[in-house]
């Protein structure tokens, strides 16, 4: 793909978008994710599903949601689509999932389940898009989440034996590992909005199936355990999005305007190199995933103390990272001023501190 095009996904410099990277690179990652996913899905249909009678509506809905999310991301990389269009497609993807049977079943009320599903899908798609702000960050975090889900699927055994789901997880996990070779700093390519939107709908969908709707081997459900698993698996996207929104609102700035004020950027301002930032973020995500795996592998009897312990773990990491972001308030102000200056002059450049 790199040899095929050095320009695919490159944006016009006269667009006024503030980015971390000082140079432009092809946004090919998302295209490769989707190609690998489709190839593996084709293999799945030949090997596992060639004698199946009828169509699995739930899997069809997942395919449709993935497809429109990919196309929207591709369009955004090429034409810089308006936010209202992105939100509409994200909403449509969530509705595809709900209408074909993939939705959160946390409440007794179907309406509440539907609303939570819509919020979750839209939130994760935007959160993963926001997290894609530095080399290797999104790919590392996404790989950790998918690996966690695969472990959960393994322990659930027959309850999650749908080859379509397992094949999809393995295919995208492999695509991410391959992409990391080219996306590790200094990177040769980005995943672009094509990749972040596809990963957003992919991760949110499988989180619904394996985390939000997690069931014990006995078939019982523990809502606090399910919510805890979601919070731990998505600890980095949740912390990053929350801190960015809080800090921008405190500055009187729109949360939806891009900037160099993400948690990863603040770790860099703190003196860490881009590679070390990716290692730190990846380590937090892996340790959090390890907690989930330990809980499942040991088959502990879940109770309030475990919920409080995991909640405390999450809160400690949140305030540790948030405190780092607040140490650079003057830098945030400088970023805001320079970002406005860059937008007015329609220049993409990295401010070197």
Image (cartoon, grey):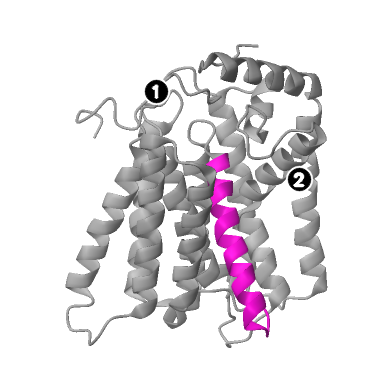
Name the side, left or right, on which 15 lies relative to 54: right
Name the side, left or right, on which 249 lies relative to 21: right
Which numbered disc flags the more N-terminal residue, 2 or 1?
Answer: 1
Image quadrant where residue 261 sits? top right
Are there few (<14), some (14-19), or many (20+) residues within 10 Å of tag 1? some
Residue 168 image offset from top left, x and y in percent = 35, 62
What residue does disc 2 label?
318
Name the side, left or right, on which 173 lies relative to 352: left
Name the side, left or right, on which 297 lies relative to 78: right
Q: Considering only vertical position in the picture, is 187 above or below 247?
A: above
What residue does disc 1 label?
12
Residues drawn in magenta? 106-130
Residue 350 seen from this side: yes
> Which residue sits at x=51%, y=72%?
209
Are there few (<14), some (14-19), or many (20+) residues within 10 Å of tag 2? some
At mark 2, the secondary structure is: helix
Residue 191 seen from this side: no
Q: Considering only vertical position in the picture, is 263 above or below 18?
A: below
> Which residue sits at x=50%, y=65%?
94
At mark 1, the secondary structure is: loop
Residue 28 image offset from top left, x and y in percent = 33, 37
Between marks 2 and 1, how big is the CA–CA gap? 36 Å
């Amino acid at each position: 793909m790199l040899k095929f095009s050095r320009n695919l996904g490159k944006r016009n410099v006269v667009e006024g978008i503030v980015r971390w990277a000082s140079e432009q690179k092809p946004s090919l990652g998302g295209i490769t994710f989707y190609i690998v996913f489709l190839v593996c899905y084709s293999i799945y249909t030949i090997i596992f599903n060639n004698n199946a009678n009828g169509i699995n509506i739930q899997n069809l809905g997942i395919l449709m949601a993935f497809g429109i999310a990919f196309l929207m991301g591709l369009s955004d990389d090429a034409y810089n689509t308006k936010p209202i269009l992105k939100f509409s497609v994200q909403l449509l993807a969530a509705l595809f999932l709900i209408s074909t049977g993939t939705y959160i079943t946390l409440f007794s009320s179907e309406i509440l389940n539907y609303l939570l599903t819509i919020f979750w899908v839209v939130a994760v798609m935007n959160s993963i898009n926001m997290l894609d702000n530095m080399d290797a960050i999104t790919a590392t975090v996404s790989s950790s989440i998918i690996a966690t889900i695969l472990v959960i699927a393994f322990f659930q055994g027959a309850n999650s034996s749908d080859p379509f789901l397992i094949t999809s997880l393995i295919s995208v996990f492999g695509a991410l590992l391959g992409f990391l070779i080219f996306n590790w700093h200094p990177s040769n390519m980005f995943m672009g909005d094509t990749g972040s939107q596809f990963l957003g709908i992919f991760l949110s969908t499988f989180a619904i199936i394996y985390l939000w709707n997690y069931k014990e081997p006995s078939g019982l459900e523990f809502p606090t355990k399910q919510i805890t698993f979601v919070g731990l698996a998505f600890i980095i996207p949740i912390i990053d999005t929350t801190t960015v929104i809080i800090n921008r609102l405190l500055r009187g700035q729109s949360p939806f305007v891009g900037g160099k004020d993400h948690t990863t950027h603040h770790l860099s301002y703190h003196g860490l190199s881009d590679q070390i930032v990716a290692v730190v973020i990846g380590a937090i995500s892996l340790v959090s995933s390890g907690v989930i795996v330990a809980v499942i592998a040991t088959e502990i009897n879940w109770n309030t103390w475990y919920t409080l312990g995991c909640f405390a773990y999450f809160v400690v990491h949140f305030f540790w990272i948030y405190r780092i972001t607040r140490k650079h308030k003057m830098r945030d102000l400088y970023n805001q001023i320079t970002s406005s200056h860059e937008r007015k002059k329609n220049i993409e450049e990295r401010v070197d501190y």
